[in-house]
């Protein structure tokens, strides 16, 4: 956030034409310094390239995006997040998404009887992880009387996504579409602020694993669009397939 406030981002372009700032690198090293003590391997967007032959032996790993939404970071619109997920046998059992510009934290844990999902806003400086969790409010919140709501990418709205939203309008009539950056889209479905998030454009595992963990703990589904099966992680190909995030309201509609 010191780098964000200074405006001195030192932007470089990576091989896939996505931006990299010195804040991405600083965040990566700060997170890695904490996670290394767990003894669990880390797959990070800004870490070294790890061959699948090595990763395939990992039944448990951290998947990290030090800054998700670097384009939003550079635009200084606040819609960037820090994503950390614990993935076990391909499924995110812990998801943590932090929104530094808003001091907002989402946590989802799916481990037997300890399953819960919360959102905390405005933690005090020096708060422990336990304090953040104790102050959190359970999600999803009640949908109240809002129209069916779709959240979509601010920077990557594809024609296929637009066609899918048009199809929803034939079913639900009034459909509200909200554009957001980074993993906030998954968190909006988890929080009950949106009913679905169709992503028919490229993403990487580190873009989604943490938000996916929050969604699962909140009772939402994240489905591989082609297979109509749960999206999994630590695959040989780290590029995600198309997927659909659906909240409880959408599941109820589909069961009718």
Image (cartoon, grey):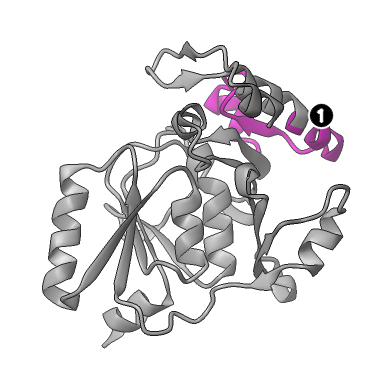
In magenta stretch: residue 210? no
The answer to which of 140 and 45 lies nearer the viewer is 140
Q: Nearer the viewer, residue 154 or 102?
A: 102
Looking at the image, which residue is at 34% across and 46% down? Answer: 153
Work out whether 196 lies above or below 152: below
Figure disc tally: 1
- In the rendered image, the quadrant that contains the C terminus is bottom left
| Residue that badge 1 annotates | 33
Q: Residue 59 at what x, y percent from top left?
A: 66, 45
Magenta segment: 31-58
Q: Which residue extends farthest front?
A: 6
Element type at mark 1:
helix
Out of 236 and 127, give the one closest to the viewer.
127
Q: Is residue 209 visible?
A: yes
- Residue 47 seen in render: no
* Furthest-bottom residue in this view: 256
């Amino acid at each position: 956030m010191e780098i964000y406030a200074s405006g001195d981002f030192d932007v470089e372009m990576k091989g896939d034409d996505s931006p990299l700032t010195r804040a991405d690198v600083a965040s990566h090293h700060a997170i890695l310094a904490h996670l290394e003590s767990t003894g669990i391997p880390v797959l990070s967007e800004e870490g070294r390239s790890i061959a699948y032959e090595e990763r395939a032996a990992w039944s448990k790993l951290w998947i990290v995006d030090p800054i998700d939404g670097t384009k939003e970071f550079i635009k200084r619109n606040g819609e960037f997040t820090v994503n950390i997920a614990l993935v076990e046998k391909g499924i995110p059992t812990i998801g943590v998404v932090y929104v530094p510009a808003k001091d907002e934290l989402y946590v989802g844990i799916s481990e037997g009887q300890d399953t819960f999902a919360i959102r905390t806003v405005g933690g005090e400086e020096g708060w422990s992880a336990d304090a953040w969790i104790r102050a959190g409010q359970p999600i999803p919140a009640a949908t109240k009387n809002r129209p069916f709501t779709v959240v979509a990418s601010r920077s990557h709205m594809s024609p296929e996504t637009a066609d899918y939203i048009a199809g929803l309008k034939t079913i639900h009539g009034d459909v509200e579409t909200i554009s957001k950056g980074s993993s906030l889209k998954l968190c909006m479905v988890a929080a009950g602020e949106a009913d679905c998030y169709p992503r028919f454009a490229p993403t990487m595992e580190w873009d989604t694993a943490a938000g996916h963990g929050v969604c699962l703990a909140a009772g939402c589904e994240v489905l591989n669009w082609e297979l109509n099966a749960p999206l999994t992680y630590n695959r040989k190909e780290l590029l995600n397939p198309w997927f659909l995030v659906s909240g409880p309201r959408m599941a109820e509609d589909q069961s009718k």
